[in-house]
Amino acid sequence: MDKLRGSMDTLSSMQLTADIEGLDAQSKTLLRSTEVLAVILRETVEEYKGYSRKEVMDFIETDSITDTKEVSQGRTNTQVRGDNIEFVHLNEKTSLFDLAFRARNPVLSTETMQISLHVDIESQKTYKPGYPIEKRGLYYLARRLSSQLSLITERTDYSQLEKCYSIWICRDDIPKKEHNTVSVYEIANTKNIGINTLPKENYDLMTLVVIKLGHTVYNGEKEDEGYDLLRFLNAIMYPHKGDFMAAVSEYIDFSENEELWKEEKSMDGLGECIYNEGREEGIEAMVLDNLEEQVPMERIISKLQKYFQLTEEMSQQYYQKYSPKA
C-alpha cells in the first residue's frame, strides 16, 4: 500500500484545523506538511506519474518551502534559490505566494545534474473573488518563471529556465456542475507549418492546475479519475468529519501516534495545547492573507474577534503588529 508515514507535526496541523471553519491560515499551515504535499503533487504533477508518494515526498526540497516569497514585480526577480535581496517598486502592492517551493524534476534530472520544478500551491476559500482565478494563476506562473533570472543582459542564458506549476485549491462558491473537478492549463505546440523537432521541455514551462471542490461531501468511486486527490482534499479542506482519520489514513499512516488524535471531543488536553501554540501564527497569517486581498481594516479586526475570541482592543493590537510597516 502506497502510504506515507505521518509525522507528529502533520498530525498537530490536522488537529489545528479539526473544528474550525473559515480559518484559511490553519489550512495553509497544514499544506506545508511534506506528507500532505506529496499526496497532492503525485496526483497533479505530470512528471510524478508512476512514482510512489514516498518518492515524491523525497523529491521536495524542504529547505525551499516558504510562504513569504513575493509575487510583486521587482521583488521575486531577485529571490532565486533562497536569496533574500529585495527591490521595492514605488506604489506597487506586495503579493505573496501561499506556499512556494522547489522539487526535483525526475524526468530531466541526472545523477550529476539536478533540475527542479518550481511549485506554488494556493488555497482559496472562494472560487469567485471578483476576477477569474485562472488569470491570477497564469500571472503567478509568469512571475515565478521570470523570477528564476536576475538582471537580463545580452549574456542571459534562457536555457536555465525550469518548469513552473501553480496549483489552486478552491473550496467554496463553485457552480454545482463544476463541483469536484480538476482543470489543467499548459503551454502546448498547437500548429506547425513544416517540420518541427523542438523537444517539449524547451517550451513546456508553465502548468496551471485548478481544483474545484465545492461541497463538504465527496461521493466519488475509487475507479473515478482524480478520486484520490479529491477524496484527500475534501477531507482536509473542510472542518473534519467523524470519518476524517479513516479517510486520511488511506494515504498517510498515523498508526504510531493516532491515539493522540482528538483524545477528547472538546478542544482541551493535547488539542488545546496545539491550538494555543499555533494561535499566534494563525492570527498573523489571517491578517496578512486579508491584507493581500485588500480587505478593509475594520473587517479584519472583526474577523479576528470572531475567529479567535479576541477583544476589539486586542484585535487592533494584533492588526498593528502584523501589518507591513510603511
Image: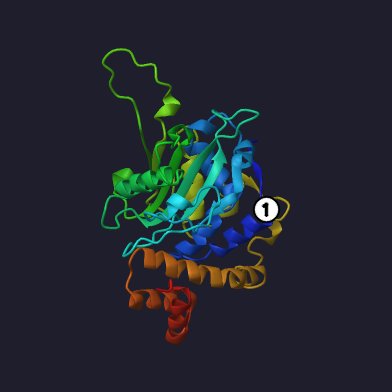
- Dot 1: few (<14), some (14–19), or many (≥20) neighbours within 10 Å? some
View extreme (bottom): residue: 313
The type of colouring in the image is rainbow
Which of the 4 quarters of the picture holds residue 281?
bottom right
State whether residue 240 appears in this view.
Answer: no
Q: Nearer the viewer, residue 321 or 50?
A: 321
Residue 72 figure quarter: bottom left
Residue at 48%, 48% (x, y): give it: 233
Point 44% across, 77% down: residue: 319
Above or below: residue 264 compared with residue 173: below
Where is residue 166? Give x, y as percent.
42, 44
The residue lying furthest to the right in this view is 256
Give the SS element for disc 1.
loop
Q: Quadrant location of the N terminus? A: top right
Q: Nearer the viewer, residue 148 or 231?
A: 148
- The x and y percentages for residue 223 are 48, 32
Task: Look at mark 1 in the image and give the residue it sits on.
Answer: 7
Residue drawn 49% across and 75% down?
A: 308
Q: Amino acid at mark 1?
A: Ser
